[in-house]
Amino acid sequence: TAADKHGVSEDHFLFTNGATEAFYLIAQAFVGQKAAIVAPTFSEYQDACRIHGLPYDLVKKAALDPTGYGLVWLCNPNNPDGTLIPSNELIDLIEDHPATTFVVDEAYIEFTDQLASLAAEVKRLSNLIVVRSLTKTFAIPGLRLGYVMAAQDLIGRLLSKKMPWSVNTLAIHAGLEIFEHYETWQFEVAELLEETRAFAAQVFTTEGLEVIPSHTSYFLVKLHRGTAAGLKAYLAEQHGILVRDATNFQGLDGEHIRLATQGPEANQALLNALKQWN
């Protein structure tokens, strides 16, 4: 079960219609509070705050001061750049600001070889909410299954805002199977990260492209000529390859794309296309 996997009792869990439902429930539960969002990052946190009327500030990680905020949103490892905040650093931050609730989105935590998850900490940190998704790890985006781990009173607060029957039967059965076979079905992260490092190194040797170091299987690339929109269009139209234009991540400009490791053939096809673009 999920409780067995994380070593946390069942009353610390709330399953949701993907991680996205969790973000909107959290924002709804903290109406009247001001939020800080560590950026650049996933835009859904901003959307959730905006829809529920929470004022928010976008702050750089290095400049984050949680004082005065009711809610702080962090993605760890971060999307889109793959940077990772060490767990001990996060725990210190959360412990030092007991009046602030920290939302830590761990959607990509299985894509790093660092022991960075804060899941077990929800048993003792009453101001921590951990959000997880099964979408990325087990390739089930259409089934919509995520979950929240937090102190019991926070779970109750979120549950009071939750619509009934938001998690469908197919997702429930998929979740039961996944947690029964979690360890055997999980991919080999060390092998994936080794492939990513080799792929990123090859991208880095391409003229005009700068790879931003990452702890995951995806990474940002800064373009030193052209635009992200132009490169995305070229790759799609000329080579049938789709990359992520990172322009809509607030805090980034139109000079960044996000790449993710695929199979060897797909990686090489992208490298060849990038060299032709240059």
Image (spheres, rainbow, N blue to C red):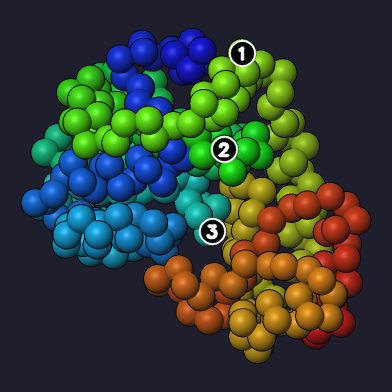
Dot 1 crowding, Cα within 10 Å, few <14, some 14–19, many 20+: some
Q: Is residue 16 left or right of residue 186?
A: left
Callouts 2 and 3 close, C-beta under 8 Å:
no
Residue nearest the viewer, comparing 210 with 188: 188
> For mark 2, what is the residue?
143
Q: Earlier in the sequence, mark 2 or mark 3?
A: 3
Residue labelled with disc 1: 180
Q: Residue at x 14, y 35 (%)?
A: 98
Pointer 3 and pointer 1: residues touching (CB < 8 Å)? no
Mark found first going from the N terminus, 3 or 1:
3
- Write the residue at 54% across / 29% down: 171
Q: Position of residue 202 (x, y in %)?
A: 81, 63
Q: Secondary structure at mark 1?
A: helix
Question: Label 2: how many residues lie within 10 Å, few (<14), some (14-19) or many (20+)?
Answer: some
Q: Which residue is mark 3?
A: 81
Which mark sits nearer the N-terminus, 2 or 1? 2
Q: Quadrant of the C terminus?
A: bottom right
Comparing labels 3 and 1, the label whose residue is closer to the camera: 1
Type of amino acid under label 2: Leu
Farthest-out residue, bottom: 226
> Residue at left 40%, top 72%?
251
Reply above or below: 206 against 186.
below
Q: In the image shown, does 153 or 207 lie closer to the viewer?
A: 153
